[in-house]
Amino acid sequence: MRTDSSPGTLPAREHLPAGDAGTPVLDVVIPVYNEEKDLQPCVRRLHEHLTRTFPYAFRITIADNASTDTTPLVAARLEADLPEVTNFRLEQKGRGRALRTVWSASEAPILAYMDVDLSTDLNALLPLVAPLISGHSDLAIGSRLARTSRVVRGPKREFISRAYNLILRGSLQARFSDAQCGFKAIRRDVAQVLLPLVEDTGWFFDTEMLVLAERAGLRIHEVPVDWVDDPDSTVHIVKTATDDLKGVWRIGKALATGSLPLDRLTRPFGDDPRDRDLTNVPTGLARQLVGFCVVGGLSTLFYLLLYSVFRQFSGSQIANALALLVSAIANTAANRRLTFGVRGRGGAVRHQAQGLVVFGIGLALTSGSLAALNAAGSSPAHSTELAVLIAANLAATVLRFLLFRAWVFPDRGESGTGSTVVASHPLSSPTYSTSTTPPHGTTAPYAPLPQRPVPYPQPYPTATQVRAGDAADGSWRDATMRLQPVRPHDTDPGEPR
């Protein structure tokens, strides 16, 4: 997996600011390989739909994956005929490579892609990108497996799709419902940090991007879609499935060993009540109590099981010490991640060492209870031992939570010792407004976003070869825009089917 440096921790999500009217808000990428037949009707249909229904400036980018037919000529004609269309040629195949290359070079604040066959109903495009524009979500995906989705496809593809998503849920604990739908969008500020961590350059690119985003705590919005299978699809199902399974194994191994720097993707929750600094109110106390109780209950069952096993070949004190030691290590690791939200390997050894100190206190309580029980009776029953241990563990649990919260995993805002980095809100971040009056203290010109120009200037490089993972100028540029509807009174008669 990649471990190269990234631009840094993400800032808080905000509504995209308004800026240069010539900069497109949305860049829809269509990766193609030998699609000379379907490319022109697809692009023209998408262009007509966006022109009629999308209230902001947009761009359609054709990402040619080293096609060997007349696809480049068709793309060039479309670029010449439609001012919002641009052509991008790559000399290597791979859908993931094409998306990473074009998204890396684009200055649009919202980056999306869809398959050339337009299997997904275009009426889902605005609902897909709206949560990203508003700052509600980081990524958005179309889902064919949502309850309200309407899907037409054969039993073979239906089985493969559902089986693959079951594999993702079982092996990688993925919570998103459809990793393979060719209908996704991402905020550019998220892409800047996330894309350098995605290694795959083929069809597994989508899954890897979503798994890393979800594990890092980013918000993924799902949109139910209407989807009709393309019987002429050129996707090789067996090879794609094999490569996907290899990718699942690679990602699962990286997550198990902790080699992914997911802490680089952390961001504050924004206007989340849990992030507000309130006097004399511990941050996230209720949530931490619930998590600690769940982990504690499972740890207690695990501890009692271990004690019963060790008791078969050792005395009560030795069995208690071994069971408590093993369960304490597991308990500290689980509370570290689930209760107190500490990600990454930073400080893990120190936390375990502090957890062992807490373990020592718990050992003293439980061992003392067993010693008192043995002193009271020569050979107490096993059920009596378990009852005494449960009572002692309850007392030790209360003390363990207090020590974990105050000493092992103190509040990051107070101690700054947590390994998860939380970005602060930039002082220069503007707030969304529909007023034409400059904000107090603002000297720069301030005006609502004007009508979408047709044609608008095209700062995007045409037919330029850019290495995957790099921007066209070799750098990442921040050109996100604050948005306002430029055609608020337009009506949409509906797309004919």
Image (cartoon, rainbow, N blue to C red):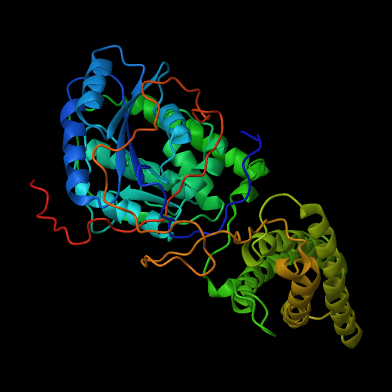
| 51 horizontally vs 273: left or right | left
Hey, which quadrant is residue 487 in on the image? Answer: bottom left
Task: Residue at 39%, 60% (x, y): give it.
Answer: 134
User: Quick check: can you spot residue 309?
Assistant: no
Quadrant of the image containing the N terminus: top right
Residue 165, x across and y down, in percent: 39, 45
Q: How many marks?
A: 0
Above or below, 156 against 147 in this view is above
Residue 71: in sight, yes or no? yes
Residue 99 is drawn in which quadrant? top left
Relative side of 216 to 148, left or right: right
Q: Is residue 321 left or right of residue 199?
A: right
Residue in front for this viewpoint, 353 or 111: 111
Judging depth in this view, the residue of 384 and 148 nearest the camera is: 148
Image: 43 above or below 111: above
In front: 104, or 177?
A: 104
Name which residue lies at 56% across and 33% down: 475
Measuring 31% from the left and 38% from the top, which residue is drawn there? 59
In the figure, 161 relative to 17: above or below? above
Q: Position of residue 314 (x, y in %)?
A: 84, 62
Where residue 496 sits: x, y (%)? Answer: 8, 47
Where in the figure is residue 136, as x and y percent of width and height?
Answer: 43, 61
Name, please, the residue furthest toward the top. 68
